[in-house]
Amino acid sequence: MERIQEDSSWSSIGLTDNDAIRQWRDWAAATIAPVDVCVFDRAHFAAQWTSHGLGQLRMLHLHAPAQRVVHCGDEGGRKRVDPSIQLIYARQGAIETRMNGRKFTLKPGEFVLLDNTRFYRMEMQTPHEVADLMMPIGWLDRHLSDPGLLLGRPISVKHGWGAPLGSLLETVMDNMKHSPLPRPMIAEQIGSLLALATGSGAPRAGSHRSYLVREVLSRIERDYADPDFHCEGLANELGISKRSLQAVLASQGTSFVQELNATRLERAAELLTDPRLFCLPIGELAFRCGFLDSSYFTRQFRKRFGITPSRWRKNRAS
């Protein structure tokens, strides 16, 4: 499988301070919604970000100015938030954080897990550099027994089992273009190292529910390209009802359609960047990934990656 190249990036270089701040705030609100950003020094604004897709995960690498970020979560009422957990890793600069009535400071060389459906506030008095890894709850539950118990607890990546995770995060931030492995595989490595760093075991291997989740995800990875691959047929093969299969996935914060579309879209993004396939129409590549309706494919692709498939291909061909 070909790996996905760098997804997208932005820099304030060449923009007026007002334009740069507006674009920075708009991007933050659209990416980590709903969020409000207050920049402390508007006259000397400088920032940049890079976004990487890692299978079902997305990593944001940010060089940010002194600012205050208020994440409203579902309490803001402005927009429904897809449940996910954010891993915030501080590379440079301290981050004063308030969450669930608690206050703590995230120091360089530490990471913390935050729930993006809940309120939190982060304040940085100096320019800082961070990695923000967005992890769907359904994905994370395959690696951690109870992620909720780990929220708001800074963990060092300089000592013990945190060190391997820190090394991997640093490498992803700096060398994603030269990754020797497919990105979904890197995501699985992150999940395993996160379990070690937090001391949280994965769900019990003997659990029937865990078995069903693993089996469904494995089948999706194998059969995503088959346009006739449906939830009902898979449920029949597993010897359970369609409703039961849906309930199992819902308990993990995901669904069959969500997982299937995510896998198909990630594969389509890879095919669109393959120089050997530039001569093929986008509709043909969508069909190879299991999409029968090219319009539906385009809508879903834009929803996931923020741009159309044709723009994605053009950006990576240039």
Image (cartoon, rainbow, N blue to C red):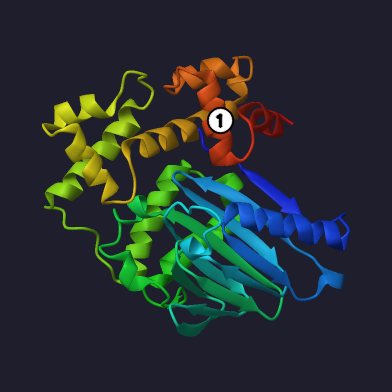
Left or right of 197, for residue 301: right
Q: Residues within 10 Å of mark 1 (few under 14, many from 20)?
A: some
Residue that protrudes farthest toward the front in the picture: 77
Q: Position of residue 185 (x, y in %)?
A: 41, 45
Q: Which residue is painted at 54% across and 61% down in the image?
A: 132
Q: Nearer the viewer, residue 90 or 115?
A: 115
Q: Which residue is painted at 21% across and 58% down in the image?
A: 203
Q: Looking at the picture, does residue 216 appear above or below residue 248?
A: above
User: Is residue 52 among the parts visible in the rendering?
Assistant: yes
Q: Position of residue 129 (x, y in %)?
A: 64, 68
Q: Nearer the viewer, residue 303 or 47?
A: 303
Q: Where's the C terminus, which quadrant? A: top right
Left or right of 209, for residue 278: right
Q: Where's the N terminus, which quadrant? A: top left
Q: Position of residue 248 (x, y in %)?
A: 22, 45
Residue type at the position of mark 1: Arg
**Splitting the image into 4 quarters, where does residue 128 fall?**
bottom right
User: Is residue 269 among the parts visible in the rendering?
Assistant: no
Please give the residue where the numbered disc 1 appears in the rendered image. 299
Q: Looking at the picture, does residue 197 appear above or below residue 62?
A: below
Q: Position of residue 57 (x, y in %)?
A: 46, 49
Left or right of 286, for residue 137: left
Q: Which residue is painted at 62% across and 78% down in the image?
A: 123
**Splitting the image into 4 quarters, where does residue 26 fall?**
bottom right
Q: Nearer the viewer, residue 249 or 281?
A: 249
Secondary structure, mark 1, is helix
Q: How many marks?
A: 1
Q: Nearer the viewer, residue 110 or 299?
A: 299
